[in-house]
Structure formats: structure tokens, C-alpha cells
Image: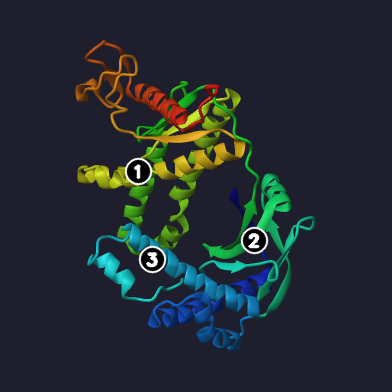
Amino acid sequence: MKVVVQVKLMPDAGQALALERTLHVVNEAANWVSAVAFERGVPHVYELRKHTYAELKSRGLGAQAAQHVIKKVRDAYTTLKANIRAGNLGKPGSRRRLKAETKPIVFRAEAAQPYDDRCLSWQYDAGTVSVWTVQGRVKNVRFACSAGALKTLQEHRQGESDLVRRDGVFYLIATCEVPEAERYEPGRFIGVDLGIAAIATTSTGYKAAGRGLNRHRKRQLELRRKLQKKRTKSAKRLLKKRRRSEKRHTANQNHIIAKTIVTEAQRTSSGIALEDLKGIRQRVRLRKPQRVTLHSWAFAQLADFIAYKAKRAGVPVVFVDPAYTSQQCCECGHIDNNNRVSQSVFCCRNCGVVAHADRNASHNIARKGEAVWTAGSESRVPATP
């Protein structure tokens, strides 16, 4: 399985200037290639290379850098086409879709630039890298990462690494091919109910409360509003500095929750059952004050974190239909909209059982997970002689 490892570069002043200049040059070249590709109907890589390679070389790009720029542009158009086909940019004729279809793709001045082993070499023991730039090869650029990330790099790094600059800091994002653990046969399934008031509730009793994260989001929202009203240079500078704060905090919380759930499943030889919530934002209709909360809900990220951590640990994961999981009684199976008394209280109208609503839903998800796993597993009935 593919895992990305991010390391922070710590260049000196001269090295930082060379890296910054390189990103600006390659992305300016990518914008020119994008315009050529758009004008010619986005040809294949080999045909696009005929029209652009000589010009890229004359701009000071090395052979490999020029190839990567062309491929980066072609991959961007492939992604755009896939998003249009999937309906992610709206319906035909919508303003957002027309804007994407009628203009060439534009790359930011500090957008990521891919490097292969001919343009980038790692010195793990010294903690440095050697990087190609438009001003020549820059050697002994120091990098920093955790001990676990360094071990993953040394043992599993393969393919390209992306050089990117965010908020004035340079990073290398390396691709690692980590072997998957052998998946075991689960004895049972742990149902995971995802929500906003409680980020995740499992059928084993674990509950990740969402109060702290929601308060953090609300505080960030209020702070952004205050800074946006001031419209001063210092306010804009602070907004730029803090623009990824909420995203980093949310990702960290999701990593902690995912690791807790996967560790519990691995310890008890259980599988994990998750709700398939794809398209929920399009299906749910909420009042205006509730929309910010819904669209800030990083349920897809949490599910992805659980899935990839489970794959590395050999824990089986299944996705189930979330229909009626919050209305069905986990004891008798009775489904009634009135069973959900409030956000946190479930009371079955048939058998009278009272439970926490999220805990009841997690048990229903666990049962559905067992059914999905059983339906997809091979039969163990001896063959008829």
C-alpha cells in the first residue's frame, strides 16, 4: 500500500532562495504548457512533449524537470476530466463547471513539483538531501522528521517525491510502498457510528466526544470574522498565518481517534464496520446556521484514516449502508422514526429498551458489518462428495 511521508526542509538562506526560484520557474513553465495543452485539445503526453519540450529546455529546465512539468500538466487535466465526469464541479452549464471547462488550468507559484531519483537524492544518516534547482544542484539541505517517518523512508521509499512550499516553509512529500499486513479472520465486528456531537462512537464503549473540536471550530470561525472585519495588513497577515490551523487540529484529532479504534480492533481480533456516508452533504437539507457545522465535518478523512491504519495492521474493514441505523432498535430490530427521542436518547416503541442513540446505532452498524463480511466471504461448508 502507498503511504506518504512528509519531511520538513531546513535550508540556509542561499538554498532557500534557489528552491523558491525553482518552484516559481517550473510553475510558470507549467502554466505555459497548460495553455498549449488547452489550445491543442489536451493531447497525450508524447504529443504534448513535441510542442513544449524544446521551449522548456530553453527556459533553463533540466531534461527530467521538463518531463515532470509536462506530466504534471497532463495529470492535472486528467484529474479535471474525472471530476467533471463524476459531477464534482456541478451540472452541465453551471457557472463553476463552465469556469473549469473554458479556461486553462493555472498553477500557483509555489505549487508542488515532482522529483525522481535523478533530481533528488537522500542522505539518511546525515539527515540531508541533494536537490536539483534552476541554479544548479543544491547539496546538504537539512531535513527533519520523526524517527518513525525516517525508518519508513529508509525501508520503503519508492517513486517520486514532491517539493512544496507552504506558509514560507519547504517540505518534501515522499511516496513509500509499505507492505500490507496479512488480514485475519475477525471473530466479531466493531461498529463505528460517526457524528458531530460525538465524532465516533463504537459498539465496544469507546466514545470520542466532539465538544472540544466543535468549540475549537467555533472559536476559529469567530476569530476569522473579527480579523476579516479589520481589513488591516496585520489582520491579513494573521489570517494567512492561521488559515490551516483548524485543518491541522482536525487531522490530528482524527489520527488519534482512528489509531484508538484500530488498536482496539487489532487487540480483540475484531473487524471494523463503518457507515458509507458518501454524498450525505447532497442528501441532507439543513437550516443555514447548521450548514457550517455539517460542511466542517471531516467524516471522510476519519474514515480514510481508519481504513489505511487498519490495512497496515491487517484489520478487516467493511462499509455498510447507513439507512435506518439510527431508527432501528439493536435489541428487537423494530424500525420507527419516533424511536429517536432526541439527539442522544433512543427509546424503542416496541420493546421499550432505552439506550444512548449513538451507541444503539453502533450496534446496528456492527451487525450489518458481520452480514456484509459473511456475504462476501468464501463458504466453509464441506463440498458434497
Q: Position of residue 235 (x, y in %)?
A: 39, 60
Q: Which mark identifies residue 81?
A: 3
Q: Residues within 10 Å of mark 1 (few under 14, many from 20)?
A: some
Q: CA distance from mark 1 to mark 2?
A: 41 Å
Residue 346 position in % (x across, y down): 28, 20
Quadrant of residue 274 in the image?
Answer: top left
Reading the image, the residue beneath label 1 is 218
Badge 2 amino acid: Gly
Up the image or down, 261 lies above or below 58; here it is above
Question: Which is more foreground, mark 1 or mark 2?
Answer: 2
Query: Number of marks in the image?
Result: 3
Compare marks 1 and 2 and give the one earlier in the sequence: 2
Where is 216 relative to 3, above or below? above
The residue pinned by badge 2 equals 159
Badge 2 element: strand
Indicate the secondary structure of the residue bearing disc 1.
helix
Instruction: Tell me the residue at 41%/73% (across/down).
Output: 105
Sequence-first tag of 2 and 3: 3
- Say whether residue 310 is left or right of residue 288: right
